[in-house]
Image (cartoon, rainbow, N blue to C red):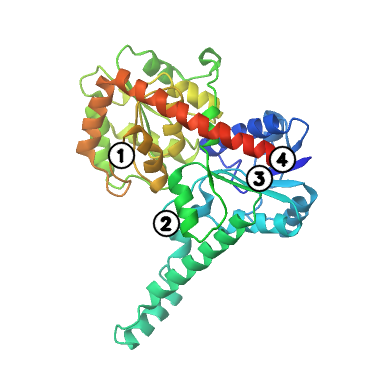
């Protein structure tokens, strides 16, 4: 059986996406050991690393060949859209790929995806320009009785949601990573059963720590006898109040008993951003940045050596949960909040409006109460893995 995995920007320096991919390959290989796997990725090294065939990254800029994409989808027996949050972040991409495979009579699976409570504003809002100006003028001409911008945005979202529903209904299996995502898909109008599984990255295992090539600065932070806080802020959407954020970092390390480790989940953009944070701290020698391109299992091994993780990137929070390190989420869309909910946690605000006082209190509470957190974490993880196992059984049936 020939199976194509894609619909996610694999190979684009996102550690979370690569963790998903490595784990989905493992899951599919367990479900169908004799299958030939292909991955749509921008990183040809994936072939050697995961033992799969690679094809170009379809659906994402720079321009790709739609004819080649359609040919690859038809040349495979099944297409698995392999996770992430694309149903809300970039729904037009996976839905198009799924529709092409479905029209060719191929088996299609939505696997482990999530959906935020709103579609990507950058794609579905009417941004400043001629069209927005025209709609505002028409609204003014109606003496305020018709809001042209709101009407157009509603039309775009409704059209996208209708496509999502139709595509989901035509799949052989639809598995989402949390109940909230299931609810959002049903709100689109989908009629089929939506299975609540879990994020595939939950089965990731850490690399042996002694095998890691780390800088002297990172090793010094991790060898520090006192508490160590891992921190990640996405460069895609930065925390708005930078000065308050730097002040928070300074408070963490102020008395010298603690250390701060910046853990980029994108080795290019996040690393540059967090190197800038470190440079602005009063005691940059009490902090370090994990530099270089890292495999997901390496990042997990580093996260396991910290005492607390704070992140606006979902998958660093997921990594912390795997090794039962306490974590704090900063919301960047509802996906972080959805993951925190089973732990009885809520985010400390969003990247646009972070509550730094609460962040400070949560930091102290979790550093002092790791044992209690670990007990809750083990129970939640057992439930998530049970959900994932049930979904894996369904996947095996679809691919069998």
SS at circle 3: strand
Q: In the picture, residue 149 is in which quadrant?
A: bottom left
SS at circle 1: loop
Tell me: 7 left or right of 3.
Answer: left
Relative to 124, say whether 73 is above or below.
Answer: above
Write down the residue under mark 2. 118
Relative to 268, say whether 378 is above or below.
Answer: above
Image coordinates for residue 109, horizontal then vertical, percent: 64, 47
Q: Quadrant of the N terminus?
A: top right
Mark 1 and mark 3: Cα distance apart in space: 32 Å
Question: Is tag 1's residue or tag 3's residue first in the polypeptide sequence?
Answer: 3
Write down the residue under mark 3. 80
Mark 2 and mark 3: Cα distance apart in space: 24 Å
Question: Is tag 4's residue or tag 1's residue first in the polypeptide sequence?
Answer: 1
Q: Give the class, few, some or many, for how many residues have Cα within 10 Å of label 3's Cα (few <14, many ≥20).
A: many
SS at circle 2: loop
Question: Is tag 4's residue or tag 2's residue first in the polypeptide sequence?
Answer: 2
């Amino acid at each position: 059986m020939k199976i194509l995995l894609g619909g996610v920007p694999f190979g684009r320096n996102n550690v979370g996406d690569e963790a998903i991919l490595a784990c989905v390959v493992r899951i599919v290989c367990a479900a169908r050991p004799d299958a030939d796997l292909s991955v749509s990725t921008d990183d040809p090294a994936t072939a050697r690393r995961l033992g799969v065939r690679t094809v170009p990254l379809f659906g994402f800029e720079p321009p790709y060949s739609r004819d080649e994409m359609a040919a690859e989808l038809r040349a495979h027996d099944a297409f698995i859209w392999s996770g992430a949050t694309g149903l809300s972040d970039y729904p037009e991409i996976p839905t198009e790929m799924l529709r092409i495979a479905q029209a060719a009579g191929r088996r299609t699976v939505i696997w482990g995806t999530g959906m935020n409570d709103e579609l990507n504003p950058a794609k579905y809002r009417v941004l400043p320009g001629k069209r927005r100006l025209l709609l505002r003028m028409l609204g003014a001409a109606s003496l305020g009785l018709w809001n042209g911008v709101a009407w157009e945005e509603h039309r775009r979202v409704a059209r996208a949601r209708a496509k999502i529903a139709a595509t989901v209904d035509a799949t052989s299996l639809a598995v989402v990573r949390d109940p909230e995502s299931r609810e959002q898909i049903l709100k689109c109008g989908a009629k089929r059963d939506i299975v609540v599984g879990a994020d595939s990255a939950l089965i990731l295992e850490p690399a042996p720590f002694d095998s890691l090539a780390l800088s002297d600065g990172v090793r010094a932070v991790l060898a520090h006898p006192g508490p160590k806080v891992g921190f990640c802020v996405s460069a895609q959407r930065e925390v708005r109040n930078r000065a308050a954020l730097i002040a928070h970092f300074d408070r963490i390390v102020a008395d010298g008993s603690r250390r701060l480790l910046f853990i980029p989940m994108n080795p290019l953009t996040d690393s540059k951003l967090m190197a800038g944070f470190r440079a602005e701290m009063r005691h940059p020698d009490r902090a370090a940045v994990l530099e270089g391109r890292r495999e997901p299992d390496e990042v997990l091994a580093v996260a396991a050596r910290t005492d607390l993780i704070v992140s606006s990137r979902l998958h660093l929070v997921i990594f912390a949960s795997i090794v039962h390190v306490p974590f704090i989420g900063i919301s960047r869309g509802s996906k972080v909040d959805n993951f925190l909910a089973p732990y009885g946690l809520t985010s400390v605000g969003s990247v646009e409006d972070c509550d730094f006082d609460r962040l400070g209190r949560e930091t102290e509470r979790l550093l002092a109460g790791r044992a209690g957190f670990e007990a809750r974490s083990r129970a939640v993880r057992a439930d998530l893995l049970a959900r994932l196992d049930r979904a894996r059984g369904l996947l095996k049936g679809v691919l069998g």
